[in-house]
Image: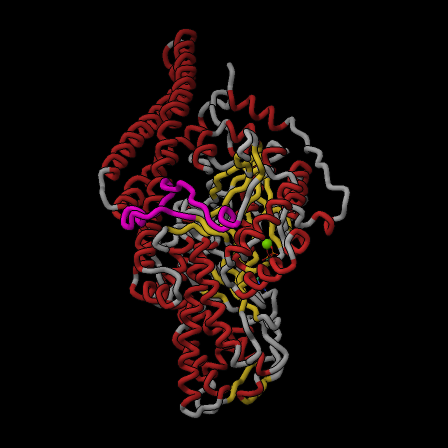
Amino acid sequence: MSNLRFKSVEEASGRKAVKVELPKERVETYYGKQVFNRQKMFEYLPKETFDSLVKAIDNREPLSREIADSVADGMKRWAIDNGARHYTHWFHPLTGSTAEKHDAFIEHDGKGGVVEKFNGKLLVQQEPDASSFPNGGIRNTFEARGYSAWDISSPAFIIDNTLCIPTVFISYTGESLDYKTPLLRALNSVDKAATRVARYFNPAVNHVQTYLGWEQEYFLVDEALFAARPDLVMTGRTLMGHESAKNQQLEDHYFGSIPSRVEAFMLDLETECHKLGIPAKTRHNEVAPNQFELAPVFEECNLANDHNLLLMSVMEEVAKRHNFRVLLHEKPFAGINGSGKHNNWSLGTDKGEMLFAPGKNSKDNLRFIAFVANVMAAVHRHNALLKASIMNATNAHRLGANEAPPAIISMFLGSQLSAILEAVENSEGNEKIMVKGKEEMRLDVAQIPELMIDNTDRNRTSPFAFTGNRFEYRAVGSSANCASALIALNAAVAAQLNDFADKVDARISNGEELDKAILAEVRVLVKASKAIHFDGNGYSEEWKEEAARRGLDTETSAPLMYDAYMLPSSIEMFDKAGVFSKKEIEARNEVKWEMYTKKIQIESRVLGDLAINHIIPAAIRYQSLLLDNVYKIKELFKGDKSDRIAAQDLASIESISEHISEIKSGVAAMVDARRKANRIESEREKSIAYHDDVAPKMETIRYHIDKLELMVDNEIWPLPKYRELLFIR
Ligand code: ADP
Ligand code: MG
């Protein structure tokens, strides 16, 4: 009998590591080779053009048309010198992935031939026929087309002979249709607000930058096994599959030695990253079998996010060269850990001060405490929104599943920072700050002691943790565009910092001393936002109850979480931060609900097909083998004896029948629930129906399929099993 599963298992287990051709030069020589960075700009642009471009980038100013033409000319020469034939505007539509439309550099030369042409107009702005990108009704409402415009703060790069120009994607009436536009707005807003506060401590500060260091988790599976799993191909996760006897219980994979096939892939991937200027640095095995992580050196947030999106697509290409498929889904396999993308986030001034790092003197430390308190206040006030910003149909499998943070946003501060904030809170009246250390210290406001924050004070169960000089936002999903989370976080922090500065300014105009005014406002924030601070075990049941008592958002349904975007506090905050208009929020929520529905709809269809066309026929085949056997037993042995001998088989036959009938009725009920849901007009209501009525039915069907997997003859089972998918040989 030909069995696709066995063929694929054989193919997969016979593979050897693919040999990687490494560049002969040292990393420094080829790092950024495919990027039009400042060094290339200097080489290819006239001096005045170079100066104007750098000035525009540094001061976030628009480019004049003449300069754009001159930049385009130099960029084209560099690209062609480096093998490019096409160019594209590279943007991040609300689908969550990246989009590009390629054009060749050629134009008619009027003599029957072509010339290679590219000018400022083509560089700066394009009009992709993008009517089929999700827009939540914005284009219908405004009857406007979308256009893409160059984001000069992120350098162009070459990939597969195409010059890619990072762009924003907006409607003609100015509404954002992508992730990059609001991210840039949020970063700009946090720059202004944080600069205002940072100047209390150092008046020379001109700008505050946001930094992001993401940690990308992913799974690898062999390509042959992947191809034999329609659910992986179509949905990125296994919709069925019984746990394998061994998975992560021995904890032997985490930080273990990397299999040679995987190591070859990683080396290849890192080399590609380095050519593209992505500073890939750390690699290691993750907790689950076949799960790995790649982390770069952190960078400015917008660039770091572009690099993460680029990485996700480069990964898929490189994986294919090694006969792997990369799974970026948050929960490809039930019963073992899922994948996240921790976002290490911090703020720093143009004078080199890291704003979440304690300093050497009291002034630095007051600044540190002020910034931390403002983050606390922002995260507290907008905890429901922050959760909505990381939630989608795929991440929903991970959060709250006892391996990742729960579906509640809280903040871990660690024992030292907690003690400091407590001391700040209790210092009212006497204006003294007490910090318990080796010896008890009693200090004046202006003498907050030198703080040494211990970086090893970690809590893996917290979705948002302070880690020494930054916050680690851990709730972000592995397949996500980080921008969604960072738009909400940066906008919320910007709005909060502005509010803080207004209050401090008011105190100063009333004659208060600067330090005292700041400390007084910090104290207000620490008191008001205490509920967000939780250093305990985020996985525990008690925490869910405690969080509800504290008034934190404990909603677990993704479609309902999105309502947080429509809260008056969110609308007001986004407006103040200049990030989203109410129209944009409404449109984006429509897209979120629609995407949620579509994801579940596809999964449900794939599951139905597999159940009816793969699983049930296999189960019936095995059942008839058993029936055959029972007949033969009855022939050979008579009476009581035959009953005894056939008893086990008969029990199995019955049990298989029951599972088959449960699967059949389950699929019928699921299809029915889908039909009902599809008739619902409102995107919100429809996604709620998919969440409440369709998704749970998938779980029931899966349960019976997984039971059958344990019973049916291994040679008949049609799909690669977990034990085959999860262990790379
Ligand atoms: P871990 O797994 O222990 O949390 P990793 O080394 O895997 O740590 O990843 C940490 C990430 O945080 C890296 O991308 C690193 O560059 C980044 N990072 C370090 N310091 C900062 C900072 N101040 N701001 C933002 N990101 C940072
Ligand atoms: Mg890590």
Chain part drawn in magenta: 120-147
Asked whether the viewer can see residue 475, the reply is: yes
The quarter of the rendered structure image containing the C terminus is top right
Asked whether the viewer can see residue 219, the reply is: no
Q: Position of residue 620 (x, y in %)?
A: 38, 19
Task: Identify the coloring.
Answer: secondary structure
Which residue in the rendered view is the most extreme toward the front?
111
Q: Quadrant of ligand 2?
A: bottom right
Q: Is residue 143 magenta?
A: yes
User: Residue 532, relative to residue 104: is it above or below?
Assistant: below
Describe residue 154's horizontal placement relative to residue 544 as left or right.
right
Q: Position of residue 664 (x, y in %)?
A: 31, 27
Q: Position of residue 531 (x, y in %)?
A: 40, 70
Which residue in the rendered view is the most extreme toward the top?
635
Closer to the camera in the image, 578 or 653? 578
Q: Quadrant of residue 494?
A: bottom left
User: Residue 269, relative to residue 549: is it above or below?
Assistant: above
Measuring 59% from the left and 41% from the top, which residue is drawn there? 159
Q: Position of residue 416 (x, y in %)?
A: 56, 73
Label count reads 0
Describe residue 214's horizontal placement relative to residue 242 as left or right.
right
User: Residue 559, relative to residue 86: is it above or below?
Assistant: below
User: Residue 60, relative to residue 103: is it above or below?
Assistant: below
Closer to the camera in the image, 139 or 95? 139
Closer to the camera in the image, 584 or 651? 584
Describe residue 605's horizontal placement relative to residue 290 as left or right.
left
Closer to the camera in the image, 648 or 131? 131
Q: Is residue 616 magenta?
A: no
